[in-house]
Image (cartoon, rainbow, N blue to C red):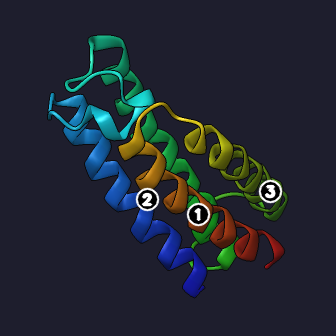
Amino acid sequence: MLAAVALCAILAALAVFQLALALGAPLGRFAWGGQHRVLPTRLRIGSAVSIVIYAVIAVLALDRAGAVDVVSDVVSTVGMWVVFAYFVLGIPMNAISRSTAERYTMTPIVAVLAVLSLVIAIG
């Protein structure tokens, strides 16, 4: 349960960050390859979609941890393994970013999310 709460807390912070990006905050060097200080419209939409994805991941994590009962056990179990794979793939993707800010900020965050999602998936 602690891993699910920690994962949700990190996702909540990332959701606030993505909301700021979607609203035009000049933080683009930390996301989406770091090529834009203020994101163009298509990447702002991507940031908004990311918030929805974070919410789905949070529900899966809390369901798998037993804090809520929203989806079937099969969905939460398989879903958390998919989430784990998603975060594991995100580690090298962030690590090879051209943006130094993104590389040094997001890579460790995604690595922590991968570890937490593994703990939750294992149950």
Q: Which of marks 3 and 1 is nearer the N terminus?
A: 3
**Vertically, is 100 above or below 49?**
below
Task: Residue 81: give its label.
Answer: 3
SS assignment at label 1? helix
**Vertically, is 71 above or below 95?**
below
What type is the residue that disc 2 sits on?
Answer: Leu
What type is the residue that disc 1 sits on?
Answer: Leu
Q: Where is residue 38 in the image (x, y as percent from the top left)?
A: 20, 24
Identified at 73% across, 59% down, the residue is 80
Residue 92: name its quadrant. Answer: top right
Can residue 69 be seen by looking at this rendering?
no
For label 1, the residue is: 113
**Residue 23 placement, left or right of 91:** left
**Residue 95 placement, left or right of 37:** right
The reply to whether the C-beta atoms of the residues labelled 1 and 2 are less than 8 Å apart is: yes
Q: Where is residue 116 in the image (x, y as percent from the top left)?
A: 64, 72
**Alpha carbons under labels 3 and 1: distance apart:** 12 Å
Residue furthest out toward the bottom: 2
Residue 74: name its quadrant. Answer: bottom right
* Nearest-to-viewer mark from 1 and 2: 1
Q: Position of residue 65 (x, y in %)?
A: 66, 77
Q: Which of marks 3 and 2 is nearer the N terminus?
A: 2
For label 2, the residue is: 11
What type is the residue that disc 3 sits on?
Answer: Trp
Identified at 36% across, 12% down, the residue is 42
